[in-house]
């Protein structure tokens, strides 16, 4: 009787099961991270500084906050300490956990076959919670995306999924994590498919993402409540306001370009500055703290301030003695700077939530302006706060469709969809290729994940003799235990098998040898396996990989085993050829 394996199921049945598992762990992971932020916020804000910040309606009350006391001047100490602790943890144990998280998850999808180191998950959770809790300007969606994508990668490995399915699991994890933490399951599901590209979408991700995001949201909401983050906004749509939303969209697109350029200039500055990398996030935290002395609104996630912007009670916004209009004019710039120093210096946290605050403050400013100039048409500035949120980050993150849906879910403002469409279209268009996510590629054609689908002509011209060949193999008389160790060392789920004379025999698969450590490799060889020669093309090697369900292909000449060529080898040579071709144009 054939042993059941999940890969034997049809696509929809298989991914219903996998997405359910990812949804459960994404929901639990989001809860753990959510309460970790609350814990460290309590330590740094309540205990150390003696202050508290507003929270959105979906998480409490935005009116119960206090940021003035005798220890207010210690804010830079808190943010510096948070940056220092975060830097020590990240650079000591998992350097890839620095930064905003989502970019690392996108990179894993495109360039690492969906592989995410297990250690990244706890390190990202701890470091991001400390950064946010200490007052750093950072969001919780990026870390949640990296945490959930890492959990998706683990699920893929435990189920012995193919590299292609591991990639999908990572993308599904991104969507499920963000949809869960934002209580926006539909938008999160679409975002998992959209955020991978600047001008494209991954359609096969949507179905499993919807399942995983719905389950994660159900688990998370069962504990923290299902009220939308910003409550329910009730208002009437007026088509006379559409020109104003268009103007806001154009301005949002321009400010999004400024956000991206500022963030990466500061990021690159900290990469090149000649100080110990452990102290770079501390320096970034210190500068953030200095900014926060005049603009405390830049600290933390900032959703409570958005809630205040959506209220009719702007007088409770702290002004540090400055006129309120000056604060509103300066706040988008200050939030961009604070976020750039907090995360661009190597701190750990997301850029989505800061983008929402920047967009909301921009929308508030223009809403007040339009209300003053055209009071009979623009009767309230609140819709502009909501539209500013989504139009700004739709441009900065290149995720127009998902952000529109997410903000509707986060505010209950379905009637604003026409305004959102106009504003987002304008911001997305004017922002061009600028994106806060450097790992995004323009379309599926440019992604290594789709190398075989779109780049066959070039692959046919690349010979195996041009690629690196690795001497990785297992002897037929070696133990299964040794084979398993060799697979683990190389991140493989199969190995080529040779005889005593180094003649290629076939392949042994991890799924076949589990719990059989006492046996020999020869008991599990799959014979009749295809291979390539030195003069074979990269396209032929790709086809062999597809046939044997592996990320490598055996290279054989006259029966003798020469080594293996891996998918990464093909991608590397392919990129070199593409670069050469572009240089000749």
Image (tube, helix red, strand yellow):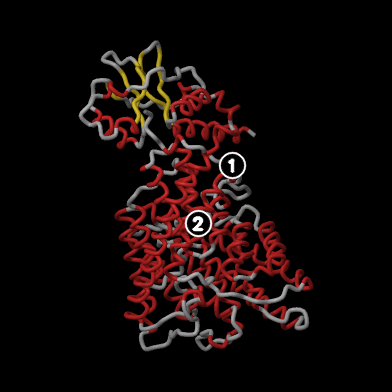
Q: Residues within 10 Å of mark 2 (few under 14, many from 20)?
A: many
Q: Position of residue 206 (x, y in %)?
A: 56, 49
Mark 2 or mark 1: which is in front?
Answer: 2
Q: Position of residue 462 (x, y in %)?
A: 53, 24
Q: CB of mark 2 within 8 Å of CB of mark 1?
A: no
Q: Separation of disc 2 and disc 1 at Cα? A: 23 Å
Q: Residue at x 65, y 62 (%)?
A: 253
Which residue is at the front of the view, 186 or 530?
186
As drawn, is 443 to the left or to the right of 102? Answer: right
- Element type where label 1 sits in the image: helix
Q: Residue at x 50, y 27 (%)?
A: 542
Q: Position of residue 528 (x, y in %)?
A: 41, 17
As drawn, is 243 to the left or to the right of 129? Answer: right
- Sequence order check, earlier mark of 2 and 1: 2
- Residue 478 visible to an observer of this rendering: yes
Q: Is residue 148 above or below residue 163?
A: below
Q: Position of residue 395 (x, y in %)?
A: 62, 59
Looking at the image, the residue that sits furthest to the front is: 1
- Element type where label 2 sits in the image: helix
Q: Which residue is mark 2?
A: 213
Residue 4's image quarter? top left
Marker disc for residue 234: none
Q: Which residue is mark 1?
A: 444
Q: Residues within 10 Å of mark 1 (few under 14, many from 20)?
A: many
As drawn, is 40 to the left or to the right of 354? Answer: left
Residue 452's image quarter? top right
Q: How many marks?
A: 2
- Residue 257 visible to an observer of this rendering: no
Which residue is at the front of the view, 29 or 143?
29
Q: Quadrant for the C terminus, please.
A: top right
Q: Is residue 529 above or below residue 72?
A: above
Residue 51's image quarter? bottom left
């Amino acid at each position: 009787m054939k042993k059941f394996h999940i890969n034997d199921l049809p696509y929809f049945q298989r991914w219903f099961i996998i997405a359910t598992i990812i949804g459960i762990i994404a929901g639990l992971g989001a809860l753990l991270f959510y309460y970790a932020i609350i814990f460290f916020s309590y330590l740094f804000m309540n205990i150390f500084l003696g202050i508290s910040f507003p929270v959105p309606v979906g998480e409490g009350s935005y009116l119960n906050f206090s940021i003035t006391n005798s220890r207010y001047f210690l804010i830079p100490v808190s943010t510096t300490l948070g940056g220092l602790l975060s830097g020590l943890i990240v650079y000591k144990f998992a350097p890839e956990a620095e930064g905003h998280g989502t970019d690392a998850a996108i990179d894993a999808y495109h360039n690492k076959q969906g592989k995410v180191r297990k250690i990244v998950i706890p390190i990202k959770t701890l470091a991001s919670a400390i950064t946010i809790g200490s007052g750093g300007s950072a969001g919780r969606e990026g870390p949640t995306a990296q945490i959930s994508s890492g959990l998706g990668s683990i699920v893929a490995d435990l189920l012995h999924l193919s590299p292609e399915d591991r990639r999908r699991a990572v993308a599904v994890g991104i969507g499920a994590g963000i949809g869960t933490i934002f209580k926006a399951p539909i938008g999160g599901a679409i975002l998992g498919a959209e955020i991978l590209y600047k001008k494209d979408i991954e359609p096969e991700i949507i179905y499993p993402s919807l399942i995983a995001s719905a389950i994660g949201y159900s688990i998370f909401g069962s504990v923290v409540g299902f009220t939308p983050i910003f409550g329910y906004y009730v208002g009437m749509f007026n088509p006379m306001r559409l020109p104003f939303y268009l103007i806001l969209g154009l301005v949002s697109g321009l400010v999004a370009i400024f956000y991206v350029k500022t963030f990466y200039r500061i990021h690159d500055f900290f990469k090149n500055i000649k100080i110990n990398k452990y102290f770079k996030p501390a320096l970034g935290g210190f500068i953030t703290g200095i900014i926060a002395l005049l603009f405390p609104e830049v600290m933390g996630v900032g959703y409570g301030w958005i809630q205040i912007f959506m209220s009719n009670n702007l007088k409770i916004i702290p002004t540090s003695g400055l006129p309120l209009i000056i604060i509103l004019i300066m706040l988008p710039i200050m939030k961009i700077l604070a976020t750039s120093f907090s995360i661009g210096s190597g701190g750990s946290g997301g850029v989505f939530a800061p983008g929402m605050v920047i967009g909301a403050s921009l929308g508030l400013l223009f809403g007040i302006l339009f209300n003053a100039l055209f009071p009979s048409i623009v009767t309230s500035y609140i819709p502009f706060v909501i539209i500013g949120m989504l139009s700004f980050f739709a441009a900065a993150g290149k995720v127009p469709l998902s952000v529109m849906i997410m903000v509707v879910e986060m505010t209950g403002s379905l009637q604003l969809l026409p305004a959102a469409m106009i504003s987002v279209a304008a911001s997305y268009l004017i922002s061009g290729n600028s994106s806060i996510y450097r790992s995004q590629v323009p379309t599926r054609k440019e992604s290594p994940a789709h190398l075989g689908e779109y780049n066959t002509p070039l692959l046919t011209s690349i010979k195996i003799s041009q690629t690196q060949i690795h001497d990785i193999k297992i002897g037929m008389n070696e133990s299964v235990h040794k084979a398993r160790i060799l697979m683990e060392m190389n991140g493989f789920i199969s190995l080529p098998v040779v005889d005593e004379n180094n003649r290629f025999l076939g392949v042994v698969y991890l799924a076949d040898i589990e719990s059989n450590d006492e046996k020999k490799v020869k008991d599990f060889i799959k014979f009749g396996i295809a291979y390539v020669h030195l003069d074979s093309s990269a396209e032929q090697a790709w086809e062999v990989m597809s046939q044997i369900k592996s990320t490598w292909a055996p290279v054989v000449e006259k029966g003798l085993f020469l080594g293996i060529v891996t998918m990464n080898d093909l991608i590397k040579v392919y990129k070199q050829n593409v670069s050469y071709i572009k240089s000749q144009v």
